[in-house]
Image: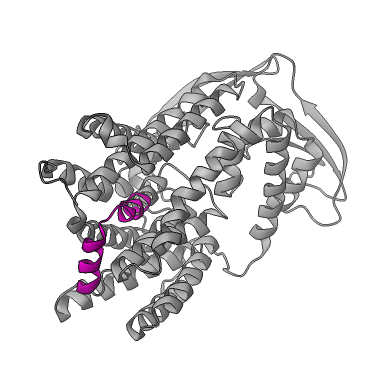
Amino acid sequence: MPRKDYQLPKVWLGILLAFVWVYPLFINYFPFKGSTTGTQSEGGITYIFTTFGTPSEMVWLFPRLMLLGLVGLLGVLQARGLQSYRNPFSYLLLLYLLFVVLGGLNSRDDDVSALILGPESRMDGLLYQIGLVLMSLFIYRVLRENRRAWPLLLSGLVVVGVVETAVVVLQRLALDPVGPLTRGFMYEVPVGTIGHPGMVAGFMVVVLIGGMGLSLRTSGTAQRVLLGLALLTVALGLGITTNKASVYALFAVLVLWNLLRRERWLLGLSVALLAMVLSAQSLVPNRLDFDRSLTDPATGKTRLVIWELALKAAARSPLSPLIGSGPDGFRLALLRYIPPEDLMREYRLEYGWPPEATIREIQTLYQPGDPIRSKAFLVFLDNYKSDTGKQGLIYKVYLDKAHNLLLDRLVSYGLFAVLITVALYLWPVWRLIRKANVFEQSILVALLAAFLYYLFWFPVVQVEPIHMVFVAMAWAMLGKPAEEGKAELARA
């Protein structure tokens, strides 16, 4: 409840709402369409290369990074001195940021830009982490003092989810409205306005669950029908992504939620939304070469190998189990400490080597003094020929994420960052899930779904800030006065 002697100016709430609603759609729709020519030296050989159009980082990541940084700086201006940071949520985030800095210092990375901006195609380095923390603190403060605006915030996100669904449906129909603007031709998979089907799914799953909590907040038959249609639309978009992590997370948390409440309306809505998710692929014709099964175990097997590599990376990097090795720590550990034979286990699955293929020899293509990321491996295989008929294949190390939030945090920023992350996501759920009203439970259940999703995925610039909005709301509930909670529970 806001202090009696101070009311937060409404302009800050307006900035917050605009940021949250715009962020999922905020990309560069008018990129450079020409070409650029440059040179790159590796192993004493200079290559001349030509790039057409704008790099994907400048389309999907850089605009959002700038927007995040701007909102974070505005959040500093909004804070009322040090007293704004005297709460457990702020302590946890600022402590997390400290371990981000320590992990970067421990990385021994020869590419300073990778520490500041993040590795190639990720942009989740120090600048992003600072912006994410400042944005999260700002959102926490504003939402804590504007609890009545929470339904409006989630309603807007549901509308954004409907827009996102419209984009992925058009992309599945080969009528992509985004690709021709951002790169001159259509995308081969439904990337939405976020850049990857799995990332689109990470956004939609929390929006879908959060929107379910609005069901008892709507007044009138027309509004409830519109909300139901909007949620079914978002469920359709989630199904089109065919992302197993989000679908399984959705199923798990809906089962839990129904066991907690045991109410017919929730059961009926849950069944309807799950049915839409599972039938989405048959409802929308597929005109792309993108067809994934929700029951295919191939990615699960790959994940197990990647997780094993991540644990080895954390164990073998200096001080890594405690403070991590920076934003690109996983790839640097694979290049420095992990035998290439171990890495080839993942490549065997990723590139579909036949079972009978065996490795005869691995040659390391690297000279002392070259940038560490230029290292590559020449692999000679028996019982296998590539499409070109050659048995020698060159592989570089592009694997940079463990596809598990906790393992990625462990390798990048250390054990304490892992514990902070677990606390941020799960402590409010553990404390409040049983006694919260329906609307509050939807936020907590969405947060739990995000955590389960992250057990098989990794945080990205395009989606993690939206998840942190739910984290901030959940932590704002922890400080709610008891009388306010009873009043809201009665209204629900």
From this viewpoint, is residue 290 visible? no
Closer to us: 229 or 282: 229
Q: Residue at x 42, y 62 (%)?
A: 172
Percent of width and height locating residue 131: 36, 33
Percent of width and height locating residue 375: 70, 26
For the C terminus, give its image quadrant: bottom left
Magenta stretch: residue 479 in it?
yes
Q: Residue at x 70, y 34 (%)?
A: 334
Q: Is residue 260 above or below residue 354?
A: below
Left or right, 208 with reference to 114 = left
- Outermost residue on the front side: it is 482
Left or right, 222 with reference to 267 = left
From this viewpoint, is residue 454 visible? yes
Left or right, 190 with reference to 388 = left
Q: Residue at x 67, y 48 (%)?
A: 307
Magenta stretch: residue 129 in it?
no
Percent of width and height locating residue 376: 72, 30
Q: Quadrant of residue 150?
A: bottom left
Percent of width and height locating residue 54: 40, 33
Q: Which residues are magenta?
A: 470-492
Q: Quadrant of residue 371?
A: top right
